[in-house]
Amino acid sequence: MRQKRLLDETAMPGMCATCPVRRLALFEPLRTGEITATQRYYRIDTRSVTPGKAIYRQGEASTEVYTLYDGWACLSQRTVEGDRQILEFLLPEDFFGVQPNRCGEARIHCAHAITAASVCVFTCGGLWEMFRGHIDLGMRLTQITARDEALAHEHLVSLGRRSARERIAHLLLELFYRVRARRPGLARVNEIDFPLTQEHIADACGLTKSHVNRTLTALKNEHLLAWRDKTLTIPDLDRLAAAANYSHDAAFHRPGF
Amino acid sequence: MRQKRLLDETAMPGMCATCPVRRLALFEPLRTGEITATQRYYRIDTRSVTPGKAIYRQGEASTEVYTLYDGWACLSQRTVEGDRQILEFLLPEDFFGVQPNRCGEARIHCAHAITAASVCVFTCGGLWEMFRGHIDLGMRLTQITARDEALAHEHLVSLGRRSARERIAHLLLELFYRVRARRPGLARVNEIDFPLTQEHIADACGLTKSHVNRTLTALKNEHLLAWRDKTLTIPDLDRLAAAANYSHDAAFHRPGF
DNA sequence: CGCGCCGTTGAGCCCGTTCAAAAAGTGTGG
DNA sequence: CCACACTTTTTGAACGGGCTCAACGGCGCG
């Protein structure tokens, strides 16, 4: 039933002017009239992606940037030996696909849909063009990129200096807060839809899936969390935070993440 | 003698218009006339920092941004238990200090000088103001931030999926290429000034200093590198790259890093 | 019903840690 | 120029967290 929702009923984007996702997305600073122009000239496409499929691949020419409209996705990179490292999980409203180099150069990582997902597609060139008309967008894009950098830095601390148990608890707390921040009015709910597999968690935390499994069952047995039917429940955020050595001035704990 | 240079003869910044560091810094897109205005209104200070001292600290209000003019520095974060994770090494010409949140909010990491260093200081508010006059700067800042994000992503792959030996070799190669890219005309030289301690490497790679030492002596014994008197020599880049499983489409291997 | 994906469990091993302690540099003051 | 303190590098022995490799079970789907 829940699976059906993920597979068939992915919401497709409509008019930019009435977009519910705009609150966090790149175009938040624009006024409604300006948004209409955005849609007409720069949003070249909306696209739906089936679970597990790539939105773009490492090595491809980078000509587009995206807003994730619905579903979960992730950015990842592979080592020469073929091991996967997940760099960032993407949630609805997240903007992604900007590269440090010029338009058209090779992508330095992949983006994959995790659930069924839909994205709004913009040309990478159009993005720079839009800046000429709307300076606020330039600042906003810098902010968004700096946010992503801060997220990556948090993950670096986890992978470098925290135990498996702490890494996993941290990741779950991060995603919990990020999901909940996107559902205004539900600030007190203690469960979220959680479509990841244990292997996703392993590849994000730099662990093996066996060990993620063992650690998760330990956390479940201690009633620090429950996870069934693609639903994650955290009965007591403070207790899990304590187990994770989680600091509440973590970057993603701020508005906008 | 070499130490003397690091301690006493740190170059101090002069006129922005003739700045040798501008090639890679934020203000690269500006014309010389515009640069003079930059200096007059936005560069509020130049500052020299002694080795090991903080440029800014986690938790402080973020009101400034910086160009590293001379010396090495690093960004780092500490866990609740006090372990340090180095997030990024900063080399001359690097621009840093931009945060995802508004001016004045708390810094989410620290910046420390590693050697004696000097920085150009700009007000964070002045930065956004400058954007109004110079759209190119907005794009440039986005590029710089995206570059830093890509660097962080590379490090995530290392910490998550590579062995100690590979991580260390990777880091040394990264720094080697970044340093060499800043010395036009010396593209063939196989040694660089390298002021880090083994503990810096440990804190960047998520390892203990003992194990870094053991791994480094192994690499030295195999003649993959030499490191004496704050000088790092890599006799054969390809052999070290092979030992590191280093891929040459790594982000920092592109121009601008 | 059979296949593939995902979660679960076990036993043994190894990479990197921990905790010491000593050696070698490096800067300071007399 | 030497004595002293401090930082950095080096080395050792024992431990353990997370890995490896393998097998099994459950569930959804064709």
Image: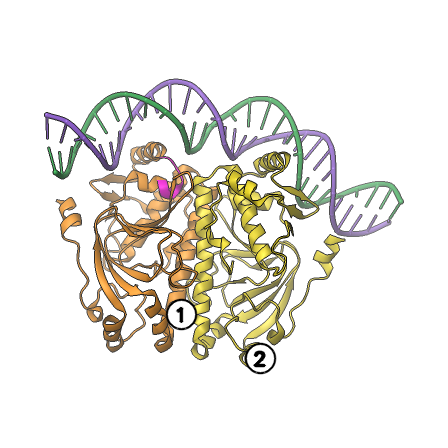
Chain colours: A orange, B yellow, C purple, D green
Quadrant in the picture for the C terminus of chain A: bottom left
Report in which chain the residue with disc 1 lies: A
State yes or no: residue B180 in magenta: no
- Which amino acid is tagged 1? Met
**Badge 1, how many Cα within 10 Å: few under 14, some, many 20+?**
many
Which residue is rendered at x = 39% and y = 42% of the image? A205
Q: Is residue B89 visible?
A: yes
Which element carries disc 1, helix, strand or loop?
Answer: helix
Q: Residue at x 40, y 40 (%)?
A: A206
Which residue is label 2 attached to? B36
Query: Is A203 left or right of B54, judged from the image as shown?
Result: left
Nearer to the camera, A226 or B100: B100
Mark 2: which amino acid? Thr
Region in magenta: A203-208
Mark 2 element type: helix
Residue A139 - label: 1
Task: From the viewer's side, name the closer residue of A33 and A245.
Answer: A33
Q: In the rendering, at what x and y percent does residue B210 appear?
A: 59, 36
